[in-house]
Amino acid sequence: MAKTVLTVDDSKSVRQLVSYTLQQQGYDVLEAADGKEALELLGNRKVEMIITDLNMPVLDGIGMIKGARALPSCRFIPIVMLTTESQDAKKQEGKAAGATGWIVKPFQQEQLLAVVKRLLG
């Protein structure tokens, strides 16, 4: 059975690129346009991994990670930040919220796949 990854980004083109990249490798992908939509999806869907942007309207990536980590089903799954932010302070904030890893945009598809495969096995 394919593993499901949730991608959360307010940029439709980024969501589509992440989805395409992962689907080509056999993953199922759910998409959300912001953190609030992501948490609503997580309330009734099981996912094995989350890839989220940091800067989004409604609920940003940090708030979404905190909300996801509060859900029993998401307490231990990998959550990777995929963002243009590269400052150490932002990375520390993400890690404190519960992020597992950090990828800076623009990203290479091979880089994304390597991280996903390493975290999901």
Image (cartoon, rainbow, N blue to C red):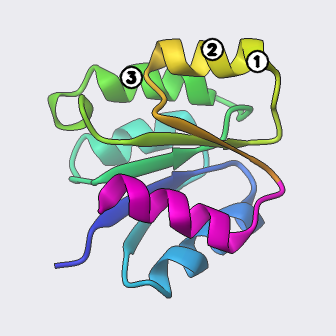
Q: Residue beneath label 3, please?
A: 67
Look at 76% across and 18% down and name the residue there: 88
Identity, as a three-letter code, of the amino acid under mark 2:
Gln
- Is residue 114 visible in the rendered image? The answer is yes
Local SS, label 3? helix
Local SS, label 1? helix
Look at 37% across and 84% down and name the residue there: 26
For the residues bearing labels 1 and 3, Cβ distance under 8 angstroms: no
Q: Residue beneath label 1, please?
A: 88
- The stretch in magenta equals 106-121
Residue 36 image point, x, y percent: 49, 34
Q: Residue beneath label 2, please?
A: 92
Identity, as a three-letter code, of the amino acid under mark 1:
Asp
Cα gap from disc 1 to disc 2, whole angstroms: 6 Å
Identity, as a three-letter code, of the amino acid under mark 3:
Gly
In this rendering, the answer to whether 98 lies above or below 50 is: above
For the residues bearing labels 1 and 2, Cβ distance under 8 angstroms: yes
Of the two numbered discs 2 and 3 in the rendering, the one whose residue sits closer to the viewer: 2
Residue 68 image point, x, y percent: 35, 29
